[in-house]
Image (cartoon, coloured by chain):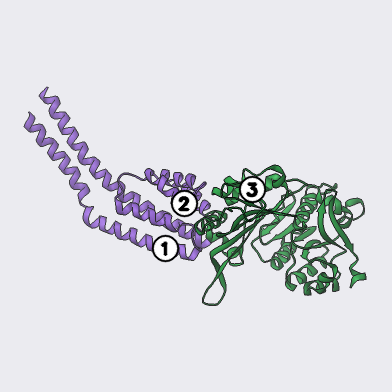
Amino acid sequence: MVDTDAFESASAALGGSFYRMLSTVGQKQRSHATEITLRKDRCFCINSECDTVFFSKTGNLCTDAAFQLYRPSAAEMEECLFRLCDYSVQTHRDQLSQGYITVKGGHRAGICGNAVRDTAGKIINFSDISTIRLRIARNIVGVADQFKAYFLGQNADTLRSLLIAGAPGTGKTTILRDIANAISNARYGRFFAVSAADERGELSPEGICCDVIRNMPKAEAILLAVRNLRPDAVLCDEIGTTAEASALTEVVNSGVAVYASIHAGSAAELLLKPQMYILSENKVFQQTVLLSGYDRSGYIYEHINMEAVS
Amino acid sequence: MRLAAALLVCLASILIGFSQAARLKKRRAALEEFQRVLIEIKGLLKYENASTDAIFRKIEQLRLPYLGTFFTKWRIYSEKSDPAAALKKAAAELPDCLLKDDRALFQKLGAFLGRSDAQTQIELCTQLAEKCNAMLAEYERDHGNLTGLYQKLGILIGIGAAILIL
């Protein structure tokens, strides 16, 4: 499961001196990197599943934070943020107010700093940026195959709704993206029309029969897709609200399959979520898997029998 | 020989007169084009929430005779750097007829383009358009008649010099 292009496009999005330093990183580090982090006046580092490596003042990588580390200045952080916005703050305003920016390639940069509020108390921006954490989105072809039995019916001519649960960084979005690409590109024999509610632009599926609704609240996008696009399946990354869960219930009741992900570290945590209560009450998902990570053989997961658990 | 010299002097004088007049007209046309660009930017921000790159591309499609090359260069330089920094490089493509104050308008546009939310940029564009309007009104008042004067002076001096030579 190696996608070094993702590292390249993510580091290019940071630009300037950060990109120059990141371009010296070796293949192994590139393939294992999960995030690139910049902390004002503290450090510039690459995070992977098992460790964190820092850039020294000379641009070399080191594992010991006691070294003379490269410490990004306030001006560099500001310039970096402006670059991540593609020099168009206006088009990223909504994302900025929620503390993130999605860049080309689906990589998501989390922003941390002083929240600026308008007169109504709504957060409109972040000033004095202290942290930028760029999460590398990987497009890995074939990861969906491992879960084929859960989202495809017999003979691969029907679809079954699947919920992918897992802690952050376990690969939920990567699997969802590949499922969308696989079924909309007829990887299993038949073309299915897929509508993706991609509010944050992270999913970015590229299948030829895939319709993507961006920048729209997921609950609204899901219903819009079912009303107007006649999909065979609807994709929803990170079900976060009960409104989204209710929208998915309507979708399933319209005869459309649903592929979604949700944050949860265990089956018990999953059941404690209010949105999960709506989903399990209405039997939205036929299958649920709980991811816990991945190794060389593929994803490590547990198939959950929701009826038995609840 | 004398006739040829008289003709040359006459032609040169007329040319200088007309080129001065054309320079003034060009400045006015460039400022009017800049106003058109500001209106376009405001529209793109208000109705499309367009990105800076999309704004540059739309401006290119306007095929502006005087400012077209400048905006194209600005877009190209902006692909790799901040629009404000790119503007410094692209400024060499601005028409020579523009005065220092006119160039300052472009610098102001570069200083805010893409740097804030759409509403703030629209307000700044409106302020800039008002300033540009005032400059055009000033031009009309001070230089409106100068164009014709330069042309007439060029012809008169040319003919006068030719007579003297002859």
Q: Secondary structure at mark 2?
A: helix
Callout count: 3
SS type, badge 1? helix
- Which of marks 2 and 1 precedes in the sequence? 2
Which residue corresponds to mark 1?
Answer: B124
Give amino acid for label 3. Leu
Mark 1 residue type: Leu
Residue in the foreground of this view, choosing between A3 and B129: A3
Which chain, by letter, is green?
A: A
- Whether residue A53 sits left or right of residue A286 in the image: it is left
Drawn colour of chain B? purple
Residue A15: % across, % down: 56, 49
Numbered disc 3: what chain? A
Q: Quadrant of the C terminus of chain A?
A: bottom right
Within 10 Å of the Cα at label 3, are there few (<14), some (14-19), or many (20+) other Cα atoms? many
In the rendered structure, the answer to whether residue A233 lies left or right of residue B92 reads right
3D distance between C-alphas at marks 1 and 2: 16 Å
Q: Residues within 10 Å of mark 1 (few under 14, many from 20)?
A: some
Callouts 1 and 2 on one subunit = yes
Which x, y percent locates residue B44?
50, 58
The chain ID associated with circle 1 is B
Residue drawn at x 67%, y 48% as measured from the top left: A7
According to the picture, the residue beneath numbered tag 3 turns out to be A61
Q: Residue A18 at x, y = what percent?
A: 57, 50
Q: Where does label 2 land, which residue?
A: B83
